[in-house]
Image (cartoon, grey):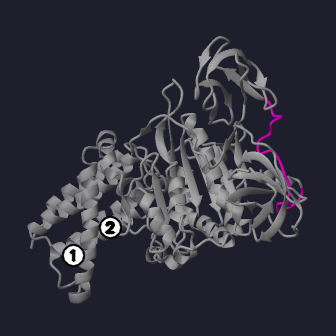
Amino acid sequence: MIKDKILKGSIWGVAGPTVIAKGLDGVRMHTVCNVGKQGLLGEVIRIRGQEVTLQVYEDTGGLTVGEEVESTGLPLTVRLGPGLLANIYDGIQRPLYKIKDSGGDFIQRGLRFAPIDTERYWDFTPLRKPGDEISEGMVVGTVQETESILHRILAPPGVFGKIRTISDEKVSGKAPVCVLEDGTAIELFQDWPVRKARPSGVKLPPTMPFITGQRIFDTLLPAALGGTAIVPGGFGTGKTVVEQTIAKYGKTDIVIYIGCGERGNEMTEILTDFPALKDHATGRPLSYRTVIIVNTSNMPVAAREASIYTGVTMAEYFRDMGYNVALLADSISRWAEALREISSRLEEMPGEEGFPPSLATQLGSFYERAGRVSCLGPEGREGSVTIISAVSPPGGDFSEPVTQSSMRFAGALWALDPDLAYRRHFPAVNWQSSYSLYYQGLADWFAKEVSSEMGELRARLMKLLQRETELKEIVQIIGVEAMQETDRLMLEVATLARDAFLKQSVFNDADAFNTFEKQFNMLRAVFAFLDNALLALDRGVYIENIIGSAFRSDILGLKDVPSEGFAEQANTLIAMIEKEFAMMDGH
């Protein structure tokens, strides 16, 4: 990364988080500056003649006109390397654990700590030797960062050459791990500008699902690995619970969780719960594969605006190692509010509801950094970044700008419904308002990896839920008793499908995570009940006898059966349903 000349100027005006400086002639956009006597961190966001406007990532209270402003010559960057995992940062990568240990529950202005401990020594295993040719993205060695994650030390983008020396012992951030013949040093850490996407190889099509273990997402509204999904919902609909559940149970190697502008007590719960949670896949602490970025609602808005770029840059770094990364942003609406506040300070022309006209463009630049890619380097690695962001529309109004702009870029919409939440139906996803644009691309994977019948069962479930909606309108007019028996049966089975399949409890160990095998066989049981009930109706069996069957409770009880060995129990239940319905007498 090329460093510009360091320039010095002075404060000419202050308005909230924005500072106007003069005397920085030649400074570039997005250059980081130290502002005032305390050296507050700021970033250049506008240049107009001799005036340079900076957004300051810390409280600007007490700044006065005439104080010095000094550019660093570099854009806002994050440090990437061993030590990121199991750490908690703010939006500009200040380590909150170290800040807390320094004596205080609040971040003091001008406080600086290295984001990663450069003095810590790591056991480095070289995978190359002197004389080997290397290219950008090639793995030169590995470090066991946590029990579950092997950290691959990569040749940075743009680096090519022949190795002169390479370490074969413990290494730290103080010395290079590898030196090329032209003198280029490859270090344990890399610094990367957060607003610049990291390069990769070819982007791969979305042909593999992002597995959450949640039935309504995996079967009905799947997201692709490397895709994007948004979770809009009003207050109390369970957005944060959905994101935490995906963090805990999602089939992903690395989790980057961004708490962007959320309430302090909500983030406190996350910070206390995550270290105690066990990884469903490995049994080790979940924090071993997690990075948390925290910017609560009482922290500076400028740092909130930077937080999602900090998070996605970390996600791309682990993607480049060949890992599948889930980036969970909670919530993107609070990030947009920070944009709006900064835009108003700049006296820009407001767009809809006061948001800047560039809102959609900036959202697009964030979401487009998701994807499944072939990584740089000759090893043939593949990695992915899947972005799942919560949206908090005021009053639950999905027509507001942030939700609508996000929908333009999201491949899956998981719309949360307050009515379902109030009825204790969780996840409170409205299956009528939600959609997935990925299913057609994933159909071959489902047919190959789950069953050739999976697509048909999903289509039948969608049709059944749609039919339920139509029948409920008829019920309001004529009542249940006046309906045809077939329609009454459809209503009952639709209710069964909702209660048995779409509702899921994260507090039940057997129900919290479901394999695709369990999801498929649960659907088989539901439709085995429907198909055999329809045959019984045709033979003249009373509808009351069918509805009162004990098999309804048996199907509901399938949620409590662990995924392991589930198919055998489901097959037994289906065989019993077929046998008992065949023995039912007609009128």
Residue 548 visible at all: no
Front residue (pair 534, 516): 516
Q: Are marks 2 and 1 in contact (CB under 8 Å)?
A: no
Residue 8 visible at all: yes
At label 2, the amino acid type is Leu
Q: Secondary structure at mark 2?
A: helix
In the rendered image, residue 110 lying in the magenta stretch gets the answer yes
In the rendered image, residue 570 lying in the magenta stretch gets the answer no
Magenta-drawn segment: 103-121
Which residue occupies 20% across, 56% down?
578
Vertical arrangement, residue 173 with respect to residue 353, above or below? above
Front residue (pair 203, 580): 203
- The numbered mark, 2 or 1, whose residue comes first in the sequence reads 1
Left or right placement of residue 567 versus residue 487 in this view: right
Measured as percent of width and height from the top left, residue 163 is found at: 67, 16
Location of mark 2 (residue)? 496
Which residue occupies 29% across, 68% down?
465
Q: Secondary structure at mark 1?
A: helix
Count of labels in the image:
2
**How many neighbours does mark 1 have within 10 angstroms: few (below 14), some (14-19), or many (20 or more)?**
many
Measured as percent of width and height from the top left, residue 196 is found at: 60, 46
**Rendering quarter of residue 349:** bottom right
Location of mark 1 (residue)? 488
Vertical arrangement, residue 183 with respect to residue 246, above or below? above
